[in-house]
Protein backbone atom coordinates (compact mmCIF):
# COMPACT_ATOMS: atom_id res chain seq x y z
CA UNK A 1 0.00 0.00 0.00
CA UNK A 2 1.21 3.44 -0.89
CA UNK A 3 0.96 6.52 1.35
CA UNK A 4 -0.80 9.59 0.00
CA UNK A 5 1.23 12.78 -0.48
CA UNK A 6 -1.74 15.06 -1.20
CA UNK A 7 -1.40 18.34 0.78
CA UNK A 8 -5.11 18.26 1.58
CA UNK A 9 -4.53 14.96 3.37
CA UNK A 10 -2.57 16.84 6.04
CA UNK A 11 -5.54 19.11 6.71
CA UNK A 12 -7.87 16.11 6.85
CA UNK A 13 -5.52 14.31 9.26
CA UNK A 14 -5.41 17.34 11.55
CA UNK A 15 -9.19 17.68 11.43
CA UNK A 16 -9.72 14.01 12.27
CA UNK A 17 -7.13 14.02 15.06
CA UNK A 18 -8.53 17.21 16.56
CA UNK A 19 -12.07 15.88 16.50
CA UNK A 20 -11.11 12.57 18.11
CA UNK A 21 -9.08 14.29 20.84
CA UNK A 22 -11.85 16.81 21.55
CA UNK A 23 -14.37 14.00 21.91
CA UNK A 24 -11.92 12.09 24.11
CA UNK A 25 -11.66 15.12 26.40
CA UNK A 26 -15.45 15.22 26.74
CA UNK A 27 -15.44 11.50 27.61
CA UNK A 28 -12.71 12.22 30.17
CA UNK A 29 -14.79 15.02 31.71
CA UNK A 30 -17.74 12.66 31.99
CA UNK A 31 -15.49 10.06 33.64
CA UNK A 32 -14.22 12.73 36.05
CA UNK A 33 -17.80 13.51 37.09
CA UNK A 34 -18.44 9.81 37.68
CA UNK A 35 -15.19 9.47 39.67
CA UNK A 36 -16.24 12.39 41.90
CA UNK A 37 -19.76 11.06 42.51
CA UNK A 38 -18.85 8.55 45.29
CA UNK A 39 -17.38 11.41 47.32
CA UNK A 40 -20.85 13.04 47.35
CA UNK A 41 -23.03 9.96 48.06
CA UNK A 42 -23.47 9.25 44.32
CA UNK A 43 -25.07 12.63 43.77
CA UNK A 44 -24.39 15.15 41.02
CA UNK A 45 -24.85 18.08 43.40
CA UNK A 46 -21.10 18.13 44.08
CA UNK A 47 -20.33 18.62 40.39
CA UNK A 48 -22.99 21.33 40.15
CA UNK A 49 -21.49 23.07 43.20
CA UNK A 50 -18.06 22.99 41.57
CA UNK A 51 -19.46 24.78 38.53
CA UNK A 52 -21.36 27.39 40.55
CA UNK A 53 -18.61 28.03 43.13
CA UNK A 54 -15.72 28.20 40.66
CA UNK A 55 -17.18 29.29 37.31
CA UNK A 56 -13.89 30.41 35.73
CA UNK A 57 -12.06 27.18 36.58
CA UNK A 58 -15.11 25.20 35.44
CA UNK A 59 -15.18 27.07 32.14
CA UNK A 60 -11.49 26.32 31.67
CA UNK A 61 -12.19 22.61 32.19
CA UNK A 62 -15.42 22.41 30.19
CA UNK A 63 -14.42 24.67 27.29
CA UNK A 64 -10.65 25.08 27.49
CA UNK A 65 -9.95 21.38 28.04
CA UNK A 66 -11.60 20.22 24.81
CA UNK A 67 -9.98 23.13 22.92
CA UNK A 68 -6.55 22.17 24.26
CA UNK A 69 -7.33 18.56 23.35
CA UNK A 70 -8.20 19.68 19.83
CA UNK A 71 -4.84 21.43 19.44
CA UNK A 72 -2.84 18.43 20.63
CA UNK A 73 -5.12 16.11 18.65
CA UNK A 74 -4.36 17.96 15.42
CA UNK A 75 -0.67 17.24 16.00
CA UNK A 76 -1.37 13.59 16.82
CA UNK A 77 -3.64 13.19 13.80
CA UNK A 78 -0.94 14.37 11.43
CA UNK A 79 1.73 12.20 13.05
CA UNK A 80 -0.42 9.06 13.07
CA UNK A 81 -2.33 9.41 9.83
CA UNK A 82 0.27 11.04 7.58
CA UNK A 83 3.61 10.02 9.10
CA UNK A 84 2.38 6.54 10.08
CA UNK A 85 3.45 6.88 13.73
CA UNK A 86 2.26 4.68 16.62
CA UNK A 87 -1.43 5.48 17.21
CA UNK A 88 -1.52 4.40 20.86
CA UNK A 89 1.62 6.31 21.84
CA UNK A 90 0.44 9.54 20.22
CA UNK A 91 -3.07 9.13 21.65
CA UNK A 92 -1.57 8.59 25.10
CA UNK A 93 0.75 11.59 24.70
CA UNK A 94 -2.18 13.71 23.52
CA UNK A 95 -4.27 12.65 26.50
CA UNK A 96 -1.62 13.36 29.11
CA UNK A 97 -0.53 16.66 27.54
CA UNK A 98 -4.13 17.85 27.24
CA UNK A 99 -5.06 16.93 30.81
CA UNK A 100 -1.85 18.35 32.28
CA UNK A 101 -2.12 21.60 30.30
CA UNK A 102 -5.77 22.04 31.31
CA UNK A 103 -4.97 21.29 34.96
CA UNK A 104 -2.03 23.68 34.94
CA UNK A 105 -4.20 26.39 33.36
CA UNK A 106 -7.03 26.19 35.89
CA UNK A 107 -4.58 25.74 38.78
CA UNK A 108 -2.73 28.86 37.68
CA UNK A 109 -5.96 30.85 37.68
CA UNK A 110 -6.66 29.74 41.26
CA UNK A 111 -3.04 30.40 42.25
CA UNK A 112 -3.12 33.94 40.86
CA UNK A 113 -6.61 34.70 42.15
CA UNK A 114 -6.34 33.21 45.63
CA UNK A 115 -2.81 32.03 46.34
CA UNK A 116 -0.89 35.21 45.64
CA UNK A 117 -3.40 37.31 47.56
CA UNK A 118 -3.34 35.05 50.62
CA UNK A 119 -1.12 35.34 53.66
CA UNK A 120 0.49 31.90 53.30
CA UNK A 121 4.12 31.57 52.13
CA UNK A 122 4.66 31.31 48.38
CA UNK A 123 5.99 27.72 48.64
CA UNK A 124 2.83 26.59 50.44
CA UNK A 125 0.59 28.32 47.91
CA UNK A 126 2.55 26.75 45.05
CA UNK A 127 2.12 23.34 46.67
CA UNK A 128 -1.60 23.84 47.32
CA UNK A 129 -2.59 25.49 44.05
CA UNK A 130 -0.20 23.96 41.50
CA UNK A 131 1.47 20.74 42.71
CA UNK A 132 -1.46 19.10 44.52
CA UNK A 133 -3.99 19.56 41.68
CA UNK A 134 -1.46 18.12 39.20
CA UNK A 135 -0.77 15.16 41.51
CA UNK A 136 -4.41 14.34 42.21
CA UNK A 137 -5.43 14.81 38.60
CA UNK A 138 -2.69 12.46 37.42
CA UNK A 139 -3.53 9.92 40.13
CA UNK A 140 -7.21 9.71 39.27
CA UNK A 141 -7.05 10.53 35.56
CA UNK A 142 -4.20 8.23 34.47
CA UNK A 143 -6.30 5.05 34.17
CA UNK A 144 -9.00 6.97 32.29
CA UNK A 145 -6.41 8.56 29.98
CA UNK A 146 -4.91 5.15 29.16
CA UNK A 147 -8.34 3.66 28.45
CA UNK A 148 -9.56 6.58 26.34
CA UNK A 149 -6.20 6.73 24.51
CA UNK A 150 -6.62 3.08 23.57
CA UNK A 151 -10.06 3.81 22.15
CA UNK A 152 -8.77 6.90 20.32
CA UNK A 153 -5.92 4.82 18.87
CA UNK A 154 -8.43 2.33 17.48
CA UNK A 155 -10.34 5.16 15.81
CA UNK A 156 -7.12 6.62 14.39
CA UNK A 157 -6.11 3.22 12.98
CA UNK A 158 -9.56 2.91 11.41
CA UNK A 159 -9.25 6.42 9.92
CA UNK A 160 -5.79 5.55 8.56
CA UNK A 161 -7.18 2.51 6.75
CA UNK A 162 -10.25 4.34 5.51
CA UNK A 163 -8.81 7.67 4.35
CA UNK A 164 -5.04 7.42 4.06
CA UNK A 165 -4.11 4.21 2.25
CA UNK A 166 -4.33 3.45 -1.43
CA UNK A 167 -4.54 -0.09 -2.70
Image (spheres, rainbow, N blue to C red):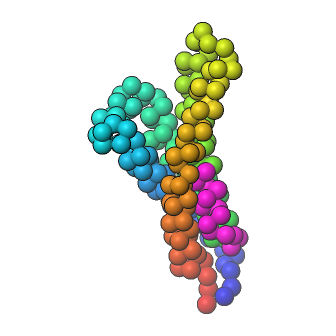
At horizontal 54% and vertical 42% (from top left) the residue drawn is 137
Left or right of 28? Residue 164 is: right
At horizontal 61% and vertical 42% (from top left) the residue drawn is 101
Q: Is 28 contained in the magenta span? A: no
At horizontal 65% and vertical 64% (from top left) the residue drawn is 89
Q: Position of residue 108 (x, y in %)?
A: 60, 28
**Residue 124, picture quadrant:** top right
**Residue 145, picture quadrant:** bottom right
Main SS class of the magenta portion in the image: helix
Left or right of 76? Residue 69 is: left
- Count all numbered tags in the image, as a single digit: 0
In front of the other: 162 or 100: 100
From which residue to which does the magenta span run? 83-96
In front of the other: 34 or 41: 41
The residue furthest bottom is 167
Instruction: From this view, report whether residue 152 is shown above or below residue 129.
Output: below
Q: Is any atom of residue 159 visible in this view?
A: no
Instruction: From this view, report whether residue 126 is shown above or below residue 106.
Output: above
Q: Is any atom of residue 43 visible in this view?
A: yes
Of the 4 image quadrants, the one containing the N terminus is bottom right
Q: Where is residue 9 in the image (x, y as percent from the top left)?
A: 62, 70
In front of the other: 23 or 48: 48
At horizontal 67% and vertical 69% (from top left) the residue drawn is 86
In front of the other: 45 or 3: 45
Q: Is 92 contained in the magenta span? A: yes
Q: Position of residue 139 (x, y in %)?
A: 56, 45
The residue furthest top is 119
Instruction: From this view, report whether residue 106 is shown above or below residue 94.
Output: above
Left or right of 49? Residue 59 is: right
Amino acid sequence: MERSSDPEQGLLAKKIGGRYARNAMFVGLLCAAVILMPFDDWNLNGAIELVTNWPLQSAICLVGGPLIGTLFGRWAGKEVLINNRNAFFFSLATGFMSVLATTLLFSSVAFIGEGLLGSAPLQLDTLNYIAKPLYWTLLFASPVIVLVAGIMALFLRWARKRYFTRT
